[in-house]
């Protein structure tokens, strides 16, 4: 029933309602300063028992788990006490990821592929986790976790073949460059649709538990993706069924050109999003590979002992643009990456190893040269198979394949008609 009576008059002395529109702290051309950022001292955050109830350590969603201090020393209860050889392998994997990124970025600028995304400054978010997980734990990455494949020893040349979409591309050019898929590496196919990998990871983890398996799942998304419905659906199922899964939110401060405030960073942390679901939640220094390793190992042990999921916010910074299609100078201060207070993940681990007497600048320079030569050799081999846009690398009939287990009759007819036309044209 509708009323024709006029709307009531405004209440006296009440200001008009208004919306809050988040604004980044710094714009292009402005001085960038992170002086107001609350960064606790390394080693100052407690480590709960593996089986502790999530409600007992809600405070860990609002602080920052750190292991490496400003002098590169590993301190505190999260110190994983890794042997030097393992630390060197972690350093090498991060350095290899960065070299791979640099060379593929240049390849895109040279017109050899259409698209690329670098993980500069975020290498620890994938490498630290990869070294803490078992090799057959299933990983459900977003599009900036190429370090997972690299840390698991996957072929650089195979990754390049996918980027180039050439005749050696196992995915036959069906995926956007950098959206890898490697079943043998327990690496789930990357999707450009945001946060879809979260419910997939939770579902896989639930299936693993239902089968009585011992493998867990881990997944990654950006902080902007936590505003997607898939993220929250995944959290509901993970919490209710205590799925053996690690939910990683890579907070690199920017979702393309939208700063993290549009996803809720002004009001609370992204780790705090797990609290409402009863999920164990940690906020971790994402540029400290030892902290990432320790937090992932803790979460993995929790999942393997049937204590349920863990949400980890990896607090880091996207040092480059979102992708090769993005110009970060159009929306953020050019000084932000340089002034980021948590430093560079490779430089921090290098400093730690040097402090242990297990590394030096000469060995580091030699490693960088060796890795650059290795990646360039892989690039040459991959480009021998073709580059994107230079001719047809896959037979035309493959467009009908790989969709149905049994091709329906109308597609068989279309496929045959196309083959007949090719034959008549002498192709």
Image (cartoon, rainbow, N blue to C red):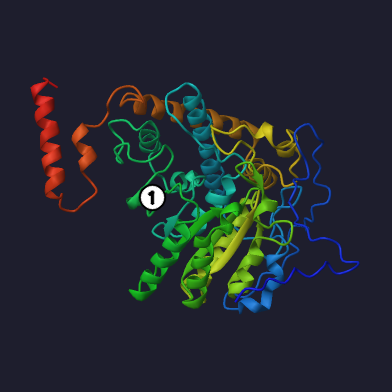
Mark 1 highlights which residue? 189
Give the tally of numbered discs. Answer: 1
Q: In which quadrant of the rendered image does the C terminus lie? A: top left
User: Residue 123 location in percent, x, y?
Assistant: 57, 45
- Above or below, 132 against 277 in this view is above
Q: Nearer the viewer, residue 376 or 211?
A: 211
At mark 1, the secondary structure is: loop
Left or right, residue 27 beside residue 222: right
Report the residue at 66% width, 40% height from top.
347
Q: Nearer the viewer, residue 169 or 287?
A: 169
Report the residue at 15% width, 52% height from top.
406
User: Residue 412 location in percent, x, y?
Assistant: 12, 43
Q: Nearer the viewer, residue 94 or 26?
A: 26
User: Residue 219 location in percent, x, y?
Assistant: 49, 58
Residue at the limit of the structure toward the right, as seen here: 13
Q: In which quadrant of the rendered image does the N terminus lie? A: bottom right
Residue at the limit of the structure toward the front, as seen here: 4
Report the residue at 53% width, 72% height from top.
302
User: Residue 410 location in percent, x, y?
Assistant: 14, 46
* Label 1, residues with CA under 10 Å away: few <14, some 14-19, many ≥20: some
Report the residue at 58% width, 39% height from top.
322
């Amino acid at each position: 029933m509708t009323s024709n009576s006029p709307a009531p008059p405004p209440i006296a002395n009440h200001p008009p309602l208004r919306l809050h529109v988040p604004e980044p702290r710094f714009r292009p051309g402005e001085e960038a300063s992170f002086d107001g950022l609350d960064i606790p001292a390394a080693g100052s955050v407690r480590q709960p028992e593996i089986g502790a109830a999530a409600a007992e350590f809600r405070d860990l969603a609002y602080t920052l788990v750190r292991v490496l201090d400003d002098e590169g020393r590993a301190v505190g209860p999260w110190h994983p006490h890794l042997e030097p050889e393992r630390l060197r392998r972690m350093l090498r994997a991060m350095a290899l990821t960065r070299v791979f990124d640099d060379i593929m970025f240049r390849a895109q600028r040279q017109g050899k592929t259409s698209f690329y995304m670098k993980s500069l400054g975020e290498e620890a978010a994938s490498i630290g986790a990869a070294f803490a997980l078992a090799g057959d734990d299933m990983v459900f990455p977003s599009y900036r976790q190429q370090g997972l494949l690299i840390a698991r020893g996957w072929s650089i040349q195979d990754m390049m073949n996918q980027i180039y979409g050439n005749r050696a591309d196992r995915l036959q050019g069906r995926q956007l460059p950098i959206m890898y898929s490697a079943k043998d590496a327990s690496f789930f196919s990357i999707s450009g649709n945001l946060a879809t990998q979260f419910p997939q990871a939770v579902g896989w983890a639930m299936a693993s538990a239902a089968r009585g398996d011992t493998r867990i799942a881990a997944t990654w998304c950006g902080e902007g993706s936590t505003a997607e419905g898939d993220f929250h659906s995944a959290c509901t199922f993970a919490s209710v069924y205590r799925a053996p899964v690690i939910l990683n939110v890579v907070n690199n401060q920017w979702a393309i050109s939208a700063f993290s405030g549009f996803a809720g960073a002004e009001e609370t942390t992204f780790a705090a999003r797990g609290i409402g679901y009863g999920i164990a939640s940690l906020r971790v220094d994402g540029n400290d590979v030892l902290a990432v390793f320790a937090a992932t190992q803790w979460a993995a042990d929790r999942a393997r002992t049937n204590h349920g999921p863990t949400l980890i916010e990896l607090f880091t910074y996207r040092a480059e643009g979102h992708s090769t299609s993005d110009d970060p100078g159009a929306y953020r201060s050019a000084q932000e990456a340089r002034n980021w207070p948590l430093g560079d993940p490779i430089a921090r681990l290098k400093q730690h190893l040097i402090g242990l007497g297990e590394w030096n600048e000469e060995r580091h320079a030699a490693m960088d040269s060796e890795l650059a030569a290795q990646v360039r050799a892989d690039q040459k081999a991959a480009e021998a198979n073709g580059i994107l846009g230079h001719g047809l690398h896959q037979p035309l009939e493959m467009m009908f394949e790989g969709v149905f287990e049994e091709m329906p009759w109308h597609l068989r007819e279309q496929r045959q008609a196309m083959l007949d036309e090719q034959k008549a044209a002498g192709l």
